[in-house]
Each structure stands twice: as C-alpha cells, then as structure tokens.
Image (cartoon, coloured by chain):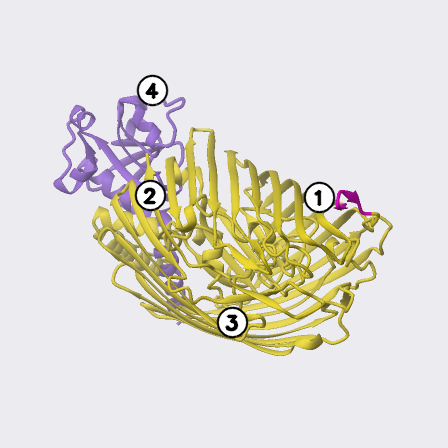
Amino acid sequence: MRALLFILICIRTVFANDVALESAIFNKVIIAVTTKEYPEVYIYKENKALEQFPGKLKIVNSCKEADIVIITTLKNLPEACKEKILFGTRYSHLRDNRVVGAFFWQKGRPNILFYKRRLERYNIKLDASFDKYIEK
Amino acid sequence: MSRIVVILMMISSVILFADDLDVLLDKYQSESELSKKTKDENGGHLIIFTRDDLERMQVETLKDVLKSIRFFRYLENRIGEPDLLNIDPVLYSSKSVRVYLNDNELVLPITGSGFLMFGNIDMDFIDHVEVYEGFPSFDFGIEPATIVVRLYSKVASRDSGTRIKFLGASHTSNKENIYTAGQSDELSFFAYANHSQNKQEKYSVEGNTIARDITMKHFYGSLSKANYKIELNALRMEHDGFLGLLPVEVPKSTNMQRDFVNASFASKFQDESLTLNISYIYADGEYEANYSTPVYGLFSTMQQEYDSDILTAILQKKIKLDVHTLSIGLQYRYKLFKFDEVKYDGVPSTQQQKYDHENIYSLFVEDSILLNTNSLLGISLMQQYYERNKAMKNESVTQWRLSYIYSTKSFVSKTFVARQEFIPEPFMTAEAHFGNPELNSEKYLAITQEFSYSKENTLSKFIFGYSKTKGFLVSDSSGVVQNSSKDLKAHYAAVGFSYFFRKKDKLELQVDYTHLDVPGSRDILNHYNYLARVINTYGKFDIFNEIIINSGFENLDTGYDYSAGVKYRATPDLHFGLKGENIFNQGLSRKYYYDLPTSNAQFEVPVVEQKFMISMEYLF
C-alpha cells in the first residue's frame, strides 16, 4: 500500500513536472534530427531537464562521442563541438549559422524553429509533422 | 524499490513519448505556468489567477480579479482609492492587505500597506496573481497581514521579444503600453512602460460636479545576472479626489497626485537557500480641494502634502534537516514619514504630527515538519520590535501561527490557527487631527479550515473559519481613532466548485458567507457573495463570462455585475479584444457620507462602473 502511494505521488510529480515534458520535447526533436533510436547527446553547458530525465537520449561526456550537441551558450564552444550538429535553447542561438534549430521560450510561449538551408547542409530530413516548425 | 522506479520509467516513457509535438508543446506551456513554481500551499487559503486566466479574462487592472475573491469585494474609499475593507468615512482600513511585486512589498509607510496605490494597478506586465487569505505565512513579509496579494512580473526567460498594446474604452478612457525583454548568456532584462487614462462618469452632488478619473504613468524594469536581480518600479498617479477627504462638505474641485519609486536588489547564495533582499521606497503625494462654501465656516481650500521613505532589508535562510524544513528570517524596516504640511486657504496648519520615523526589527522561525507522506505540520513564530522615535511607546509583539496540511491524491485538508498583533500605523497614531498616540495594538485570533477534493475534471472546495479581534479600531464622536472595548467577531464559510471540460474550458462557481459582529452602532452584518465564471476557447476565440452578486454589505446596495469578453487571436502574435464590464450597470453600489454631522445624507455610486473596451496587442 505504501509502495502504491509512493508510485501515485511520483506519477503526480512526474506528470505535473514541466521538466519531464521539456525532456520529452527534446527527445522527440533529437530523435527526429539524428534519425537514431538512442542518440548520443553532449550538453554544453547545462540542461536540467535532460540531466534529470534523459529518456532515450544517452548523455555523453564529450563532443567527440556525440551525434548532436545541445547548447545553452555558444561562448567558448569546444572545437570538437563545432563539427557536430548544434541545437540551441534560445532564439539568439539561431543567429549563428552553425545552429540548425532551437527549442526556446519567446513571447510567452515555447517555440521550435529550424532553418531549411541549415538542415540541408547537414542532410537532415525531418518528417512532415515538423513542416510547421521549419522556416524556409 | 527498484521495481517501482522501473514501473515509473515505463509509465513515464509511454505517456510522454506517445504525444505529438503540438500536444507536448501545449502541455509543456501549461505545466510551465510560473504560478506552479511560486505558489505556497502552506501560505494560506490560496486563490491563483494564472497567466492563462489573466489573458483569457482580459484582466486589465488588479480590480478585475479582486472583485471576485471569496469573503471580500473590491471597494474604493471616498477619494477614489482602492480600500478593500473600506468603512466610510474612515479613509483607509486595508492596512492588513499587503501587496507584493515579486519579492518586494509595495508599501506606503503612512498607511501601512500599499493597497491604496496598488490595489488597482495595471496588469499588462504581470504573469500571474496569488491571493493568500486567512493570516498568511510570516515567510511573506516583515509585518503581519490578513490578505497577501502577490503579483509576479513576466520574466525575460519566457517573454523575450516585444509587445505593444492599445486599448480604448468608454468615456474616452485609453491605455497604451509596451514591454520588451531579452537575454544573453549572462544578463537578462525586462522593461515595461504604461500610460493609461481611466475616465469615469461625472456626478453632480449638492450643485458640485465630482469625478474620479485617473491618469497613470508606470515603469517597471528588471535586470538579472546569475543569482542577482535589480528592479525599479516607478508609478505616478494623477487623479480627481471625488468626494474629498472631509465628509462634511462636497468639494467644488479636487486634485491629487501620488508618486512612488521602488528600487530593490535581490541575491541568492548557498544553492538558493540563503537570500538577501534590500528594498528602498520613496513615496510622495499632494492633495488639494476647493469648496464653494467655507468648511466649518473656516476655510475654502485645503492642501496637503506628504513624503516618505522606507528601507527594508530581509535575510532569510532555509535549512533542511531530516523531516524538518526550517525557514529563519531576520528583517529590518526603517520608515520616515512627513504628512503635517497642511494648508487651509494657503495658511499652514499649526498642528504637528506626533512622530516621524519608526524602526521595525523582526525575527521569524518557521518549521515545516513532514510527519508522514501525507501530513505536513507548520509552526511559525515571529517576534517584532517597533522603535518609535521616543515620541511614542515602543512596542514588542509576538505573532504565532500553526498549520496542518493533510493531502492524498484527491483530497487536501488545510487547518490554520493564528494569533497576530497589528501595531497601529502612523496615519492612525501620528496624524495631527484624528491620530491617537495612545492607541494599543489590535490582537487577532483566527482558526480556518479548508477541504478540497479533486477528480479528473472537477475541484470542490469548502472553507470556513472564525476570528476575533480585540482592540478593533473605531472612530469616536469627534473622529479620533480609539480601541473598541468590544471584540469584533467574524464567522465565515465558502463553497467553491470548478469544472474543467473540453481542452481548456472551465466553469467556476462560488458562494461565500460572512457573519460579522461589529463593535459600535453597526452591530450584526451578514454578507453574501456569489460568483459564476466560464472561460472557453473555441479555435482562435477566447470567451469569458462572469457574474458576481454581492449582498448584505453596509452602505452597499445589492447588485449583480455581469462582465464578458471575447479575445480573437488572429495570429499567434496579433490579438484583438472586446470586453464589457458591469454590462447591465447593475453592479454593487457604494454610499458615501458628505454632510456630516449636519445630516447622515449619503451619495450612492457604482463601485465598478459600466464600461466597454476594445484592445489590440501585437508581439514581435
């Protein structure tokens, strides 16, 4: 009974938790971008949602091992990361041409945005459900 | 235990990854409501207006939400300023209603709280509102309160970008504002500027035309870096003085101006468990009234000026020890106030205020004890010391509060018992005309209980309580404030029901009742408030309907206020709004004295006037 109560409390916590949902969105996007079921991800520098709930993502310790890099800043980005697919967490990250897309808050709502040319540069093909998030 | 974790992970994976991206983004936006991070269920009987509520209800000013909170109704005093507990002709009775913007109390030193200036503040920079009723937690501030209204501003991390808004309303009222926010790796900023003119019906009383129009200019800005934040909040209000300060004669004309500037610094250390907040407030004001016939046969013009400063410093530490969460706070507040610059027909009054500054020291300890997975016991103790410039006796008071919260998946019970002591504010003690330096503190004892039961689509609440006030402040026959020898007693109860349907729609029903045994001639009063509110979203349209019925209030006629609005989201960045307030002009009306002591004649006006407005918002 006590265990059941614990489960119920945890479920309430998990699903009342924006962090878990944020991770689910990252999972969805990163799996689509990398076309891998269990992509390897390097986080530069921190992302509480993915660190807490990695889901299907394997968090790695260096850019070398990574399929994609989630960036919270572009400042002092390690050289090894620059060759990888970069995905931003702020609208301002998209000002850098190397960043293919971003998941960010703006104007009071969460947004996902990709640039078509940048996706093409990395030969990334997203399925039709992503069309509304791609700017031509 | 490991099996449980595995089950949890499996369930979470199935649910989280099954949804498509649009659905996930919607859920994420809803679950990320800032109110979910800031609310404190242990803080009191809580009413939340989320950002989504504020947007879909087209809330323009704080009054739009305060007029529907249980047990109270929005009121203004005889000079057109917010005063939730107004008892005319007493100018201000809401000293225990405290307003906060983020972590800063918006306080005016003379009146003891800032509700008078911020009770109807513009809301376009506000993310959400939390109202705590029933002697809220000491965690909130340095001085005790019966109601705490916490306003949380929008934040740069969510609202990067710029929004402009224009609003036009009845009687050529208008509002224009802009906010802009942005962030870099190290800094984030939010800036908001508002100009509004709220024009209302003009009335003729005893051959004089009286008005309560208000022009407001407001700036709010914040700058954050890591664990440090500075904020600047500046407000100028220019308005008519309506029936004037004096209930003895109707003024021919009135003019008022109030200025308020608050600069604050907040910092967090030790993994955010240690906080230091420093806040400085400067406030000044002017009032002028002209009369056709001399008041008391003595003067035809009255001018009053005040200025004041407040410095507040709060150091707070949270410590987790096994099942205990300790919150320890050390607080200091310095108040300086001057309000004896009164002129009659241009001649300065010889009356002098009795003292002009005050030091308040406060120490509080709050222990939240997790008794088991379902039960939380809270014990709070606050010791305060008021040092008053040797002109008045210093005061040392003790406040305590006990809380017990029991919760299961669907049921929550909250019990609060509190004993609080309110030291009279400067306008009651130091004011030259009706102030009384011999006043003793008011002592409150209250017990309140809340039960709530939630199912998938419903939330039901039942709240009831009893409170007793010793030394309640009343005016004697010469207008001087005195402690009543009889206690003020109140019984109250409220029932609320919310039904959530379709994707985002909700229906809210609420009935509340208050029985007051008031010292003095007013005796027994029974108040009733009824609320029905429906908020719907159909495609690009947000529709809001609300009816509020208030009855049984002294000097207030029973009325029903029906308000409704439609918001059209043409694109995610362009919105148009149409709203009517008190549409049938049948809302609660208020009576004010204007011919005392010659007669008990009263003038009656709607508390919230009939108003229609149209608005446009554009984000870029």
Report the disc number at residue B616.
2
Circles 3 and 4: CB atoms closer than 8 Å: no
**Where is mark 4, residue-wise?**
A79
Mark 3 vs 1, N-terminal side: 1
| Residue B142 position (above or below residue B511) | above
Instruction: Name the amino acid, label 1.
Output: Glu
**B195 with respect to B456 (left or right):** right
**A44 or B359, which is in the foreground?**
B359
Region of the chain picked out in magenta, as a range? B341-349
**B269 or B198, which is in the foreground?**
B198
Mark 3 vs 2, N-terminal side: 3
**Where is mark 1, residue-wise?**
B305
Residue at x 58% of width, y 70% of height: B555
Circles 3 and 1: CB atoms closer than 8 Å: no
| Discs 3 and 1 share one subunit | yes
Circles 3 and 2: CB atoms closer than 8 Å: no
Number of the front mark, 3 or 2: 3
Q: Which chain is yellow?
A: B
Q: Residues within 10 Å of mark 1 (few under 14, many from 20)?
A: some
Residue B551, image x and y in percent?
A: 50, 74
**Where is mark 3, residue-wise?**
B557
What's the colour of chain A in the image?
purple
